[in-house]
Amino acid sequence: MVKKITYQVKNPQGIHARPAGMLVNRVSQFKCKVVIEKEKETVNAKEIFALMSLSVKQGDIITITFDGEEEETAVKAIEEFIKENL
């Protein structure tokens, strides 16, 4: 079953290189497909350049979708990560 998180980015710098790299490392630990959507543009959250191409700024709303084996565990871990870092 597909799981989704919708989040408004609070970090004043948006998703810049450091948090993007941390997010990619975190989602890459899970055996599920993870995609991030911003304004109808969707990218693979396990690819740093794809994630950076979204140019996510403070106040932007992103939707993170999880699909696969470890989606439940991934959702919990990524929810915690985004609250602390984004």
Image (tube, grey):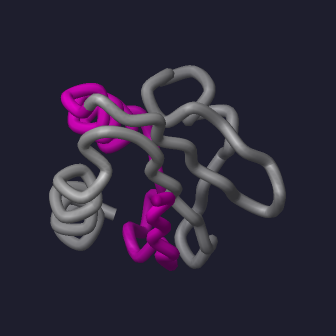
Give the quarter of the image for residue 5.
Answer: bottom left
Question: Which span is picked out in magenta?
Answer: 1-30
Q: Residue 51, image x and y in percent? A: 56, 35
Is residue 40 placed above or below 24 in the rendered structure?
below
Question: Which residue is at 38% across, 68% downward?
Answer: 11
Question: Is 22 part of what is drawn in magenta?
Answer: yes
Q: Residue 3, image x and y in percent? A: 45, 64
As drawn, is 2 to the left or to the right of 55? left
Give the quarter of the image for residue 39.
Answer: bottom right
Q: Nearer the viewer, residue 10 or 65?
A: 65
Question: Which residue is at 58% across, 65% downward?
Answer: 62
**Quarter of the image with the C terminus in it:** bottom left
Question: Which residue is at 58% across, 78% downward?
Answer: 59
Question: Which residue is at 68% across, 33% downward?
Answer: 53
Is residue 26 placed above or below 65 in the rendered structure?
above
Q: Residue 6, image x and y in percent? A: 51, 75
Toward the front, the furthest residue is: 1
Question: Is 43 part of what is drawn in magenta?
Answer: no
Q: Residue 18, image x and y in percent? A: 30, 36
As drawn, is 41 to the left or to the right of 86? right
Q: How many marks?
A: 0
Q: Which of 75 and 59 is in front in this view?
A: 75
Q: Which of 50 and 58 is in front in this view?
A: 50
Is residue 5 placed above or below 77 in the rendered structure?
below
